[in-house]
Amino acid sequence: MRAGIVVFPGTNRERDMAIALQGATGTQAVMLWHRDTVLPALDLVVLPGGFSHGDYLRCGAMAAHSPIMTAVRSFAEAGGHVLGVCNGFQILTEAGLLPGALLRNAGLRFLSHDCHLRVEREGTAFTRGWSAGDVFRAPLAHGDGNYVADRETLERLDGDGLVAFRYSDAAGRVDAGTNPNGSAGNIAGVFSRNLRVLGLMPHPEDLVDPLMGGIDGKPLFDGLVQALAA
């Protein structure tokens, strides 16, 4: 599998993402600069975390208009797989590749701690390493992770099985007490209609090796290799 990691001014998780991807056997990861206008031959495009363009205007708003995003949109429209994590999720919503928006956390504070995520849909390229209902741990680090959408969109996400992950406790309980940032329905990640674009706020790439404190995030990357490797 060949993955391209897009780097914007202010991106700071590209190396973490490369380590996670290259730790999945059979993966080559290449860095792409935001001013590039043509993508090389790729199986996956990744928009990693950070603070693109200093989070001026809205998080991800400026990055969504970077030159490379025209190519990323075309890649997605042609059926390519795209993963956006944290700031990458914000960019995907600003670019219109995923529904909804990410607003300030309900408590108006930057959050940085581990959380638990419950897998809501199995069998996709991104979630084939888990079963629905599985729970895994992932670090979160964001000030604007409050997922919002209008009622019609939220009903469609639920009805069409497009919610990927929800914030939960270690036992999989989902309620207001397990919601760190106020996200509607405890939503931590969503899919596009064709299940080939995924955005999520927490950072599974930061738990892929025992030296990091665990391997809870590794099934995401191993599953992508199984799904996308030629």
Image (cartoon, rainbow, N blue to C red):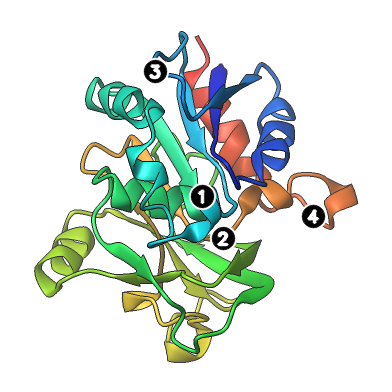
Depth order, front residue of 143/171: 143
Q: What residue type is labelled 1?
A: His
Residue tagged by mark 1? 53
From the top left corner, tell me how far across and down residue 191 is, in percent. 32, 48
Q: Residue at x 60, y 45 (%)?
A: 11
Q: Do the residues labelled 1 and 2 touch (CB within 8 Å)?
A: no
Mark 1 or mark 3, which has the lower sequence index? Answer: 3
Say if 96 sits above or below 19 in the image.
below
The correct choice, above or below, for 110 with respect to 90 in the image is below
Please give the name of the residue rendered at 69% of the width and 32% of the height, measured from the top-left corner.
18
Q: Left or right: 211 with respect to 37?
A: right
Q: Mark 2 points at which residue?
A: 202
Whether residue 100 is visible to the viewer of this picture, yes or no, is yes
Using residue 191 as the reference point, say whether residue 149 is left or right of it: left
Q: Tell me the distance, in whole angstroms, between the alpha carbons under discs 4 and 1.
A: 31 Å
Q: Is residue 15 left or right of residue 83?
A: right
Closer to us: 103 or 202 = 103
Question: Could you tell me how far apart the alpha carbons at marks 4 and 3 are, in whole angstroms?
Answer: 37 Å
Closest to the observer, 122 or 197? 197
Compare marks 2 and 3 and give the one earlier in the sequence: 3
Q: Is residue 191 visible?
A: no
- Which of pointers 4 and 3 indicates the residue nearer the eye? 3
Identify the residue under disc 3. Answer: 37
Q: Tag 4, which secondary structure?
A: loop
Q: Which residue lies at the image location 52% right of the left edge and 81% below the top edge?
A: 180
Tell me which numbered mark, 4 or 1, is placed earlier along the sequence: 1
- Secondary structure of the residue carrying tag 3 is loop
- Label tally: 4
Contact between marks 2 and 4 (CB within 8 A): the answer is no
- Residue 132 in the image: x percent, y percent? 43, 56
